[in-house]
Image (spheres, rainbow, N blue to C red):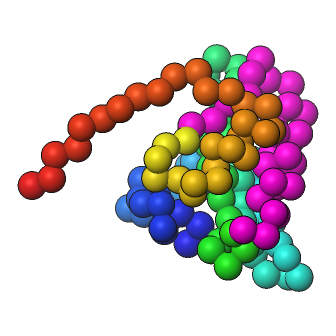
């Protein structure tokens, strides 16, 4: 549900076995709850170069726009650095929420590359 509005579809086809395999790797999941209800999550993953990627970060739609994402991203960054990586990084794209990139920049991230793709529709 976190990524439904942003076309996060890359894991929808995963089987239960594939999910278990992924979770057995060097990944960490954090769930944000508000008054006992799930509100968002982030996933940290160790990359081959010794860095930590904030692989997923998102809020459920009913919690977007309340400022909670700022606090959750701060926590994600703190938890990532606590794993003593050589770098902490993430990807974003124009499909993400319009506040995503400004939030990342305010938490110390900086853009290092911009890519453009031509998508052909059948």
| Res. 107 in view | yes
Residue at 79% x, 23% y: name it: 85
Confirm whether the magenta stretch covers residue 69: yes
In the displayed structure, would residue 87 be above or below residue 26? above
| Residue 76 x, y percent position in the rendering | 80, 46
Q: Which residue occupies the foreground of this view, 83 or 88? A: 88
Left or right: where does residue 30 sit relative to residue 14? right
Can residue 46 be seen in the rendering of this structure? no
Residue 10 coordinates in the image, percent (x, y): 42, 53
x and y, in percent, of residue 57 in the image: 66, 52
Tell which of 26 and 69 is nearer to you.
Answer: 69
Image check: 108 left or right of 2? right
Q: Quadrant of residue 78?
A: top right
Stretch in magenta: 65-91
Image point (63%, 43%), residue name:
101
The quarter in which the C terminus is drawn is: bottom left
Vertical comparison of 60 with 109: above or below: below
Q: Is 45 within the magenta? A: no
Q: In the picture shown, does residue 46 fall above or below 27?
A: above
Residue at left offset 49%, top offset 43%? 93
Residue toward you, 21 or 75: 75
Front residue of 70/52: it is 70
Asked if residue 26 is positioned above or below residue 3 in the image, the reply reads above
* Residue 96 spot, x, y in % from top left: 53, 53
Q: Is residue 68 left or right of residue 91?
A: right
Give the residue at x 74% y 22%.
87
């Amino acid at each position: 549900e976190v990524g439904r509005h942003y076309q996060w579809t890359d894991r929808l086809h995963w089987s239960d076995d594939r999910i278990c395999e992924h979770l057995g790797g060097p990944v960490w999941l954090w769930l944000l709850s508000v008054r006992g209800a799930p509100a968002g999550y982030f996933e940290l993953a160790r990359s081959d170069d010794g860095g930590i990627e904030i692989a997923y970060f998102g809020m459920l739609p009913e919690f977007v726009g309340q400022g909670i994402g700022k606090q959750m991203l701060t926590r994600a960054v703190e938890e990532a650095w606590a794993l003593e990586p050589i770098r902490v990084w993430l990807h974003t794209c124009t499909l993400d929420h319009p506040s995503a990139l400004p939030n990342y920049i305010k938490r110390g991230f900086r853009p290092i590359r911009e890519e453009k793709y031509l998508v052909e529709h059948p």
